[in-house]
Image (cartoon, grey):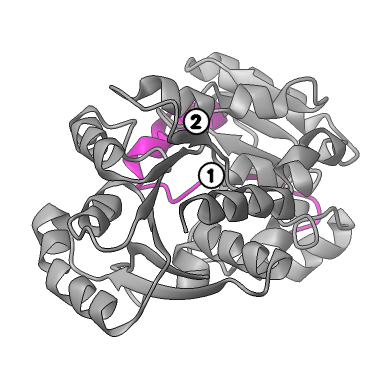
Amino acid sequence: MKVLIVCSGNAPNFDFQKHQAFIYDQVEAVKRVDSSIEFDYFFITDKGLKGYLRSLKELKKRLKAERYDCIHAHVAASALLANLQRQVPVVATFHGSDINDVRLRFLSLWVELLSKKTIYVSKQLLQKAFFYFNYKAQVIPCGVDFGFFFPRPKEVSKAQMGFAPEKKYILFSSSFDNAVKNYPLAAAALNLINNPNLQLLELKGYRREEVAVLLTAVDAALMTSHTEGSPQFIKEAIACGCPVVSTDVGDVKSVIENIEGCFITSRQPEDVASKIRQALNCVTPINGRERIQRLDNELIAKRLISLYQSIS
């Protein structure tokens, strides 16, 4: 079986493993489980809907030159492009940036109609869709590589990252300028705590290997997003034993449920600050890995393989 991955590749100095880490990890897990499945890639380098549509000619050229059993397209715009050809069946994954945006939800509806199979990364995301077919839509979250994200001695990780041993560090879920992630709420909460030895770090520009160490070096992981699908940041933090504070977005509540040291917060700065203080009181790594074993990358890979085989 041969699968063509279609996704955005328009980030500056694009690196598949870095900029589309969740897709890269998923593909690698599938290959580990079933080495007979081959993957090829079509990265969309133009921006905007018109830019995506300009890529159609090149995509059709690729499909004429190579035989694929299916296309797996990630995010609605990529999936719409993939469906503008009708030669190869399309599996479309909605990750949240599409369904959570009302304007793009209309686009997602067309993707649902045209695709052979659709994947929603959380039940909450599926429930937001304008319409879906029960026979083709599935909830399959992105998995976690537990062999890559695991607890490490904090002192060693802090030294490796060059952190001051006397300071406390909180890792924000993305870059500060990502509007969806709601950095102003995080900043307001930190201002209320007003501790000069507490530093909020921006998750930006790190390699995957560095992120795995970073999540064991910081004292808490913070997500204040307006919307999410099924955030990898939360799952990977838990796998690394890092306390979590998050707004109730995507499937976060169900992922962190009953894990001591993990907290759901409202969007009030006072509540966020209170939950951060509680998270910082966790002196040992949280024990959440066992609670999220259902998200193991290889278990998710088996579900994907079954889906691929159902349409080949």
| Helix, strand or loop status at disc 2 | loop
**Does residue 170 belong to the magenta stretch?**
yes
Given contact means CB atoms under 8 Å apart, are the residues at marks 2 and 1 in contact?
yes
Label 1 packing within 10 angstroms: few (<14), some (14-19), many (20+): many
Q: Give the mark, 2 or 1, whose residue is nearer the N terminus.
A: 1
- Of residues 188 and 39, the one drawn nearer to the viewer in this rendering: 39
Percent x, y of residue 48 = 15, 55
The answer to whether 245 appears left or right of 183 in the picture is: right
Percent x, y of residue 250 = 50, 28
Which region shows up in magenta? 162-191
Percent x, y of residue 128 = 37, 22
**Can residue 162 be seen?**
no
| Helix, strand or loop status at disc 1 | loop
On screen, 162 above or below 299?
below
Identity of the amino acid at label 1?
A: Ser
On screen, 35 above or below 307?
below
Q: Look at mark 2 in the image and give the residue it sits on.
A: 224
**Does residue 176 belong to the magenta stretch?**
yes
Identity of the amino acid at label 2?
A: Thr
Percent x, y of residue 41 = 40, 74
Figure quadrant of residue 72: bottom left
Q: Look at mark 1 in the image and give the residue it sits on.
A: 173
- Of residues 255 and 214, the one drawn nearer to the viewer in this rendering: 255
* Residue lying at 24% horizontally and 71% vertically, measured from the top left: 45
**Can residue 209 be seen?**
yes
The answer to whether 222 appears left or right of 125 in the picture is: right
